[in-house]
Amino acid sequence: MQDEAIQSDCIIVGAGLVGTILSIALSSRGLNVTLIEREKTERQAQKDARSLVLSAGTVGILKSIDAWSAISSLCTPIEKILVSEKGVLPRVTLKAIESGLDALGYSCPAHLLLHNLRKKAFSYKNLRFLDDTEFRDMRLTKLGVQAELYSSNSLVDVEARLIVAADGANSDVRRVSGISIDKKDYSEVALVCKVSVSNPATAMALERFTEQGVLAFIPVGGRDYVSIYCLSNSELMTVKELDGEAYASLLEERIGGYLGVLQLVGPRYSYPLLSQRALSLRAERLLLLGNAANVVHPNAAQGLNLGIRDVADLVSLIGCDVPDIGCEQILSQYTKLRHEDHQKIHAFTDSLGGIFMSKMPPFIAVRRFVMLLASRSVAFRRKIVASSAATDEQFCRSN
């Protein structure tokens, strides 16, 4: 049964973080936005164990669309990152103050970040939110494009000037549009859990190279951290057999005792690690953003930040007086703006994976040389921060 038709300026498929942030940016500019989410809101509200790191550049973008105020109280500043390798000297401490920054980044629990940003988005009367709604198909019309949706046992048609696919790595919109992907499976997983520690390091994250993989601890406030352990699939099977107390002891030993006694807070979650890139960012009256366009290895905490830069560049092209936000000029300019950044981040995260996660002697030698150089040179540490913190001035053009 088909019982409803909706008119909109922009249809955003996917109400995750990137889609929600884009909906705020467009709604604040007076555009009529329809935001679509496959999951029920209450189902998606189930706690996500991840803690996401927002770069300084991302914070600037969020401030420019008046979204930072909705989440700033949830975020923990990271002023230092201690990088070490088990049994090897020197250790390296990256410091925000050396690069003239207040913080290298800001950590925030993913589920709270999404909850508060959605509250901000839903405050706009020109935004319509449809959850528990499946994207089925799209077709061009005289005025733009029409999306066919399925919700509550009914077909819903939404007509707009532009469809934005922000529906994740397994994007239905990308599949329906016929855009292919290039995919690389690292045969690794990130094992994530929340821990409480007896000896917290104020405003400091830790990253440690172990024989089994890279281990990171991200502060999320007080004595709590999120632990992220990148492991091979075979190593994961061994670690998963440990109970909570045994796994906490393993983490204590492998982080070198820096944080004292650890206690798990809640369950462990595993996320497969892969790299994926859409071979095109666009089709007629369609753009891909966020993980629908790119998935990168989390070793540089660039995934969400890359998606938010997608939002910033798109919004920079759409003024309040643009009559057709899905026109050829905007589609082609968006593609040109994003191409270099996407290429650069894929190359950067792949090279980090090779240098800092490989067990091959040549890569270990390179890693240790980089660590030695970073321990001795402030200028080199600044370069590392500039490469990974995404504070490039080019992303301020939309502010």
Image: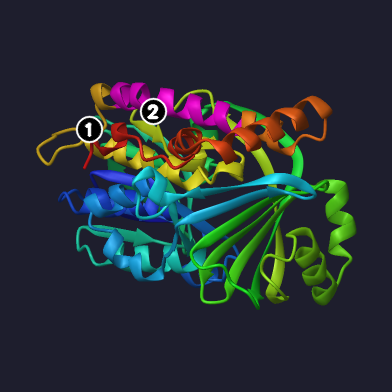
Q: Quadrant of residue 269?
A: bottom right
Q: Considering depth in this image, is 205 or 90 the residue closer to the camera? A: 90
**Quadrant location of the C terminus in the rendered image:** top left
Give the x, y percent position of residue 203: 48, 64
Residue under label 2, please give it. 338
- Residue at 27% from the left image edge and 65% from the top image edge: 69
Q: Is residue 143 left or right of residue 191?
A: left
- Residue at 9% from the left image edge and 37% from the top image edge: 321
Q: Is residue 217 left or right of residue 144?
A: right
Q: Amino acid at mark 2?
A: Arg
Give the x, y percent position of residue 96: 42, 50
Q: Considering depth in this image, is 262 or 86 the residue closer to the camera? A: 86
Residue under label 1, please give it. 317
Q: Is residue 139 left or right of residue 94?
A: left
Q: Considering depth in this image, is 119 or 68 the residue closer to the camera? A: 68
Report crowding for label 1: few under 14, some 14 to 19, many 20 or more residues within 10 A (C-alpha).
Answer: some
Q: Is residue 20 left or right of residue 243?
A: left
Q: What is the span of residues highlighted in magenta in the rendered image?
A: 331-350
The answer to whether residue 38 of the structure is visible from this angle is no
On screen, residue 191 above or below 381? below
On screen, residue 74 above or below 311? below
Please report whichever mark, 1 or 2, sits nearer to the chain's N-terminal start: 1
Report crowding for label 2: few under 14, some 14 to 19, many 20 or more residues within 10 A (C-alpha).
Answer: some
Q: Amino acid at mark 1?
A: Leu
Please, which residue is most extreme toward the front here?
Answer: 376
